[in-house]
Amino acid sequence: MPMRISGMSSGMDIDKIVSDLMKVERLPQSKLKQKKDLASFQMDLYREINTKMSAFRESMNAMRYSTNMTGMKGTSSSTDVNVGVSSNLPATSFSVSTNKLAVAAQLSSSAKISTEGFTGSALSASVDITSSNSQMLVTFDGITKAINLTEKTGYTPSELQVELQKQLDTSFGQNKVKVNLTGANELQLDPSAGSNGYKPQIKFIEVNGAVNSLGFTDNQSFRLDLNSSLAASSSKFASGAIVDGEFKVNGVSINYTSSDTLQDVIQRVNSAGTGATMSYDAFNDKIVFKNSATGATQVTLEQVSGNLLSALNFTSGSISSADAIPNAVKGQAAEFTITKADGTSVNVTSNTNQYQISSSMDPELSKLNDLAGINLTLNKVTTAPVSVNVSGDADGIVNKVKSFVTAYNDLIELVNKRLNETKSKGYAPLTEEQRADMEDKDIQLWDEKVKAGLLHDSSLLKDIKNQLREVFTTNVNGVSSEFNALFKVGITTAPYIRGQQQDAGKLIIDETQLRNAIAKDPQAVSQLFTSNPGVESQKGVAVKLYEKSNDFLSSLIKKAGKVGGSTTDITTELGKNVADIQLKILDWNDKLSKKEDVFYKRFSTMESAVAKNNSVLSWLSKQS
């Protein structure tokens, strides 16, 4: 880079001259930046459409399943039983009496599996703490912090007690952990119990020798540490050392070694397809095996070899929750009675507390076939029959239709606006220099002018408008001819009003006509939106619109990327365009830097010549 000197000899403002010259040189790069800004603005506008399209798709998703559009609703007289309706059926009423809830079988340790306590070995009469043995990590109640002991030569045991107490108080708060000193000069930690009596876990982790200097061992903890190896945890198990071996959960083998942690074993059980989960109840210090499914099944455990189950305080040998032991919960099915309005009572047994009444060939359950499509959730054993009513739910369908129409109108209004906008003459993207000289509000107004018309006549937006409109004018085959099109249930296109292009194609609802249709044939209205037998001509309106909105979202993402995504995402059409332009802009930075150096070099040469001439003239003037 040449020396950049001012015009001391020539009297010229070299920096100003070069700056003006560079403005001309930067014109090609400025045009590239404006081109990049235009592409970025286009991305923003398409992503704005994407947002509206996503909202429209979600409204279709709420309508495309028949279970959401039954036109019926269920209510109960008590929260002991919840009711849902997943198919069209006549209004009806009945009662539910719950005798037993479904319960998952479980087994838990018969007693605590570990011993509590955190006591170190006897300390010397004098302990030196220096930079080489002052640091350690302490985990308390799930929070880990670094602790630095104050360096000192010749700590007495009582002084170390005070120092450790001070550091723990500073890190975790006053009175969280009590540091005691036994008569044998052993430091002893005692976490303070909460209101429920539970004492949190505390653990020391060695960094550079501080743990050992305090008389403790690396990873020593107050209670059993799930992440320490079974071998290292032997002192915490009430039963002592763990021997390698195998046990079975519901007949599935689980192998372990003393190098595994208890957390490893828990994860192994939970991922082995045993049909049960294994967990640690920290409050009660017990292991719990619980079947994943409710119903009259049992948890079975068998110690094949080793001693882990025994160490976890489960009876040695083969045991199950069917055994009469205090720590077992026997699995059971739900038992309840449905009594219909005509007095017919049916006793039902279910392995879960969620029961869907469906058509059955069973002589007893077939008495409920007229209630097929009603879903019951049993929450509590009842003391009195719970009354259930199934009645028309016109509001449910009407509200979903209103949401769909609102989402569509929001989308089509924005599409119309962008298609009909024309470019504003005289507005180009602002340069960096122009933005620096303008107020934020003025920049925003200018950018809006620049964005206007960028999606004018977009083929993608035209496809969105035309293909969605086509669905609204198509009959749905297989649905009652009285209600097989939107206009037949009161959903029509608003009339065109000159000068209001943004409202062209919007939908309007005749709510009275819609409610009358639902009252007359709720199943037909439901099918108009949700029919989906796999034949294109028989697909319901919501099904078709959901599929098309999905397709259009994919096209919008391919064009401009996801909302909030990078503007230089080369997997998108506009993103690649922006990235390519950005590379050209970077290339120009190097060219312009070199060009600026050339200008300064030339002016430097000129300045040297002028200085030399001035020197000669000065000498000549002195000779006369």
Image (cartoon, rainbow, N blue to C red):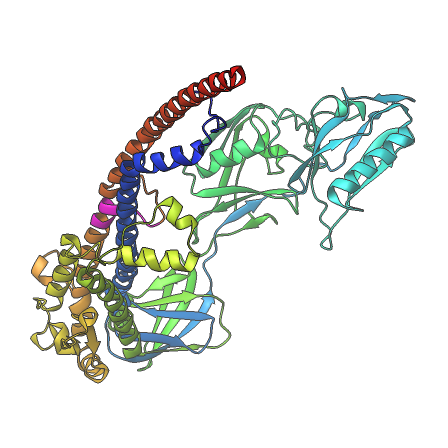
Instruction: Give the side of residue 406 with respect to residue 3, left or right.
Output: left
Residue 42, position as x, y percentages in the image: 26, 50
Q: Depth check: give the residue in front, 506 or 529.
A: 506
Instruction: Give the side of residue 174 with respect to residue 602, left or right.
Output: right
Q: Is residue 113 visible?
A: no
Instruction: Give the side of residue 293 with respect to residue 468, left or right.
Output: right
Residue, x 18% and y 80% (percent of image)?
A: 517
Residue 182, image quadrant: top right
Q: Residue 193 in magenta?
A: no
Residue, x 37% and y 22% (percent of image)?
A: 602
Farthest-out residue, front: 624
Residue, x 15% and y 61% (percent of image)?
A: 465
Residue 576, position as x, y percentages in the image: 25, 38
Residue 195, image quadrant: bottom right
Q: Is residue 142 above or below residue 464?
A: above
Q: Depth check: give the residue in front, 604 or 373.
A: 604
Q: Is residue 589 visible?
A: yes
Question: Number of labelled discs?
Answer: 0
Quadrant for the N terminus, please. top left
Q: Which residues are magenta?
A: 555-563
Residue 242, position as x, y percentages in the image: 62, 26
Residue 101, position as x, y percentages in the image: 47, 62
Residue, x 45% and y 31% (percent of image)?
A: 253
Q: Residue 562 in magenta?
A: yes
Q: Is residue 302 above or below residue 42?
A: above
Main secondary structure type of the part rendered in magenta: helix
Q: Depth check: give the residue in front, 516 or 568.
A: 568
